[in-house]
Image (cartoon, rainbow, N blue to C red):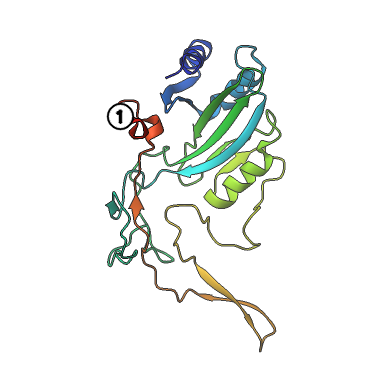
């Protein structure tokens, strides 16, 4: 861990004693959790306080933690024979169909989160700020557009793909999916094959929507690889 990273973590804990839920450091990056009711106050302080000066929000994304830690099957290496192994039975993330439900593996209020990536150009620092929506059935958090205008389209994307609502957003509507699209594609309970198929019908001379005919299955394994640049205890193989 670099000195600047530790200094930022310590400064956050000191400045926002009762406002931040947690401050952690991983892979030499600082992560801060904040509640929805304290989000705007903390975000404004991060922008305006001379100790932080996070002038820019460079990215914001939604996260669905409902199946966090669960894998259908996992390997350390990809098979050279091709990705042919798949899950054959049960309603799992890879084989969901329209109407299937998955039981959340996390507690209420810890399923949906909006994660903002902040940068301080003047101090050459970065920060990841995360806020959870208290209601899993109706996830809503405050908008950051009043603090960083760049949050506008990012929040629309998180709303479109995850169904996370941003209160007081000036123009919260879908940005990637089509008008009338059903569901939110990046939620863990959204079928990988989608809910409907779309094609052009020459007889009707228009685009029609029909039930999905593709068989849902898992083809690609989840392969976990460690980046050796961040494994300080292992020797550099290039030097051996």
Q: Find the residue positioned furthest to the bottom.
A: 203
Q: Position of residue 69 (x, y in %)?
A: 32, 43
Q: Position of residue 144 (x, y in %)?
A: 64, 32
Q: How many marks?
A: 1
In terms of image quadrants, where is residue 201?
bottom right
Q: Find the residue positioned furthest to the front.
A: 240
Q: Position of residue 211 (x, y in %)?
A: 49, 75
Q: Nearer the viewer, residue 66 or 199?
A: 199
Q: Position of residue 179 (x, y in %)?
A: 66, 62
Element assignment for label 1:
loop
Mark 1 crowdedness (10 Å alpha carbons): few <14, some 14-19, many ≥20: few
Quadrant position of the C terminus in the picture: top left
For image coordinates 48% across by 18% down, the residue present is 5
Q: Nearer the viewer, residue 225 or 12?
A: 225
For image coordinates 28% across by 52% down, the residue present is 75
For image coordinates 49% across by 65% down, the residue present is 194
Classify 41 as above or below 128. Answer: above
Residue 25 as seen in the image, left or right of residue 58: left
Quadrant position of the N terminus in the picture: top left
- Residue picked out by circle 1: 234
Classify 78 as above or below 27. Answer: below
Residue 40 as seen in the image, left or right of residue 30: right
């Amino acid at each position: 861990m670099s000195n600047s990273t530790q200094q930022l973590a310590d400064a956050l804990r000191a400045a926002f004693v009762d406002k931040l839920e947690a401050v952690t450091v991983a892979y030499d990056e600082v992560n801060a959790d904040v509640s929805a009711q304290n989000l705007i106050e903390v975000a404004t302080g991060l922008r305006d306080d001379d100790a932080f000066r996070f002038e820019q929000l460079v990215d914001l994304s939604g996260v669905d933690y409902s199946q966090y830690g669960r894998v259908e099957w996992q390997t350390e290496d990809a098979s050279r024979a091709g990705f042919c192994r798949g899950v054959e039975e049960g309603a799992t993330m890879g084989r969901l169909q329209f109407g299937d439900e998955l039981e959340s593996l996390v507690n209420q209020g810890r399923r949906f989160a909006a994660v903002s990536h902040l940068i301080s150009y003047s101090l050459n620092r970065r920060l990841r700020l995360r806020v959870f929506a208290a209601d899993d059935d109706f996830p809503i958090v405050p908008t950051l557009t009043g603090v960083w205008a760049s949050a506008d389209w990012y929040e629309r994307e998180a709303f479109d793909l995850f169904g996370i609502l941003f209160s007081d957003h000036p123009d919260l509507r879908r940005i990637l999916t089509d008008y009338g699209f059903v569901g939110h594609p990046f939620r863990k309970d959204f079928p990988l094959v989608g809910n409907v198929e779309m094609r052009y019908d020459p007889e009707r001379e228009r685009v029609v929507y029909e039930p999905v005919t593709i068989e849902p299955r898992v083809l690609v394994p989840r392969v976990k690889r460690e980046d050796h640049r961040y494994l300080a205890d292992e020797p550099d193989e290039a030097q051996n």
